[in-house]
Amino acid sequence: MQFIDAHGAHIPQIGLGTMTLKEDVCVQAVKTALQVGYTHLDTAAFYGNEKEVGEGLRASGVKREGIFITTKVRENNLTPDLFQKSLDESLAKLQLPYVDLLLIHWNNKDIPFSVSIPALCKAKKDGLAKHVGVANFTTKMLDEAWAVTTEPLVCNQIEMHPFINQDKVVAASKKHGMAIVAYCPIARGKLEGGEALETIGKAHGKSAAQVSLRYLVQLGAIPIPRTATPDHLKANLNVFDFKLSDAEMAELKKLNANNMRVVNPPHAPVWDTP
């Protein structure tokens, strides 16, 4: 496993995304992932599966100290009291005294950063999160958040795959020394239609999904693909034994022109344009 370092956080470069994984499916996916070598789990209060993620962790037999666990606080809980309540509930469901990384899941345009960011920083000061960061923040939001934070924001978790151009927000995140955690890294399975991915995959004896993950890894991002299928869990982890050439990376970069956004809920911000 490779790692990305950002403001003291040592983040495994492949993680297991758990959105939509529920009940025993989630427990077994987490257990299997940890047993086959994953050391990075991503969940959120909104996913409704923190209890199962915790159960999977305990069932795996893997030591907690070796696992990097992220959870998130939703946009409707960003005032201090609600933020603390959400975090307390998350830790209770996970049955953990702290998480490695705590994120603001989505911003709330009605709550200023002077309110939400201190609530996030308090979690780190109180020892309930080793590191803090944000998700779905635009370039403007990053600058505004950094202007009021008292703790380093170690990552920006964003949708990222070959079919979307995120150059501006990636550059802004890097300017602040932040890691990029890439959700929907295989565009929720919509990659299979990408001929370039298939062709490049065949040249390396890899799948289109593995090529997409490798593309992100070579860009320095941290993909967190979601799957509950044991074979896919292993395959998604197995992207460190081949390298895409500069020409292959350039070919995949051309796919950014699709600018296909998989996740765009009503409360999303006004996204940066390519």
Image (cartoon, rainbow, N blue to C red):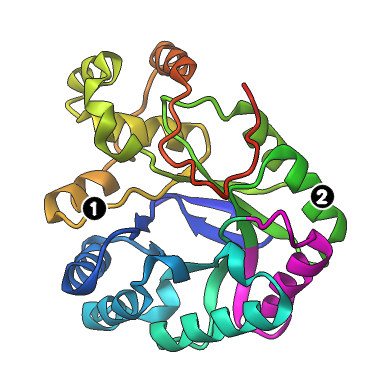
SS at mark 1 in the image = loop
Q: Quadrant of residue 29?
A: bottom left
Query: Which span is picked out in magenta?
Result: 107-132
Residue identified by numbered label 2: 144
Decide which of 83, 172 is in the foreground and name it: 83
Disc nearest the viewer among 2 and 1: 2
Res. 35 visible in picture:
yes
Q: Residue at x 26, y 68 (%)?
A: 30
The amino acid type, in three-letter code, at marker 2 is Glu
Residue identified by numbered label 1: 227
In the displayed structure, 58 sits above or below 212; it is below
The location of residue 38, given as percent across then percent down, is 32, 60
In the displayed structure, 6 sits above or below 254; it is below
In the displayed structure, 130 sits above or below 144; it is below
Q: Residues within 10 Å of mark 2 (few under 14, many from 20)?
A: some
Q: Quadrant of residue 27?
A: bottom left
In the displayed structure, 95 sits above or below 167; it is below
Residue at the farthest right position = 147
Q: Residues within 10 Å of mark 1 (few under 14, many from 20)?
A: many
The location of residue 208, given as percent across then percent down, is 24, 28
Is 252 on the left-hand or right-hand side of 270?
A: left
